[in-house]
Amino acid sequence: MVRKSARRGADVTFNLRVATPKDVRELVRQRHEMFEDMRPRTPEEHSVGDSAYGEWARKKMQEGVLRCYLVETASGEIAGGGSVWLREVQPSPGRPARLTPYLMSVFTDPRFRRMGVASLVVREAERWARGHGYPEITLHASKKGRRVYAKLGWERTWEMRADLASEKPTRRVTAGRARS
């Protein structure tokens, strides 16, 4: 897949390709940079995450449940990438247990931002998922990424989380008031 994008008067041609397990080091690098963009991490946090993600990604790619993309310039520079993980979901009314595509680790090198790289990855992930009969695809967007996805027609959904490592006590809400 090829897409041309103009920025500051220069045309750039991008080629999107499916990554292989040989590309895991690059996928880890992009994910590392993605997390650093969202919130700076300690070297220790990155070390643990990078190592674990590399092993996980290689295994999931070999199992056929992680499809990764890399976007390159015509000269071979990596401009960005992203992945679709087929994760298992529990049965619910009207839906037996199955795999569902989850878009993750979408990253664009700062030199190529605002040139359509992330959109290229998202559209290819959507095309692939639709072509394999999946009725939807989901993701967890960073604050910076929300604009990109909204422009592409994605809808924001509602998730909540509890920070179990926090020292804060869990609070119960009763009749509109929080109680410790």
Image (tube, rainbow, N blue to C red):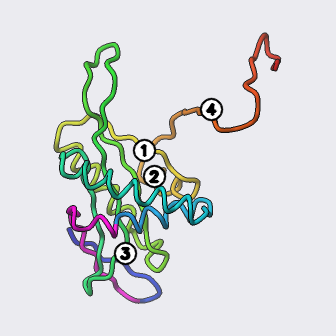
Q: Residue at x 42, y 44 (%)?
A: 139
The mark found on residue 79 in the picture is: 3
Inspect the image, locate mark 3, and give the three-letter code of the amino acid beneath it: Ala
Name which of mark 4 and mark 2 comes first in the sequence: 2
The mark found on residue 139 in the picture is: 1
- Image coordinates of residue 58 in percent, x first then y, are 26, 55
The residue pinned by badge 2 equals 149
Inspect the image, locate mark 2, and give the three-letter code of the amino acid beneath it: Tyr
Name which of mark 1 and mark 3 comes first in the sequence: 3
Query: From mark 2 to mark 1, how far is it between C-alphas?
Result: 10 Å
Q: Residue at x 30, y 32 (%)?
A: 88
Provide the secondary structure element on which disc 3 rests.
strand
Can you say whether 149 is above or below 174 in the image? Answer: below
Can you say whether 29 is above or below 142 in the image? Answer: below
Q: Residue at x 32, y 63 (%)?
A: 120
The residue pinned by badge 4 equals 162
Name which of mark 2 and mark 1 comes first in the sequence: 1
Q: Kindly indicate whether the residue at mark 1 contacts the one at mark 2 (C-beta within 8 angstroms).
A: yes
Query: From mark 1 to mark 3, how far is it between C-alphas?
Result: 21 Å
Q: Nearer the viewer, mark 2 or mark 1?
A: 1
Name which of mark 4 and mark 1 comes first in the sequence: 1
Q: Residue at x 17, y 44 (%)?
A: 131
Asked whether, in this view, residue 86 is left or right of residue 115, the answer is left
Q: Which residues are magenta?
A: 10-26
Asked whether, in this view, residue 31 is left or right of residue 85, the answer is right
Seen from the viewer's position, the closer of residues 151 and 167 is 167
Residue sticking out furthest to the top: 175
Inspect the image, locate mark 4, and give the three-letter code of the amino acid beneath it: Ala
Q: Kindly indicate whether the residue at mark 2 contacts the one at mark 4 (C-beta within 8 angstroms).
A: no
Provide the secondary structure element on which disc 4 rests.
loop
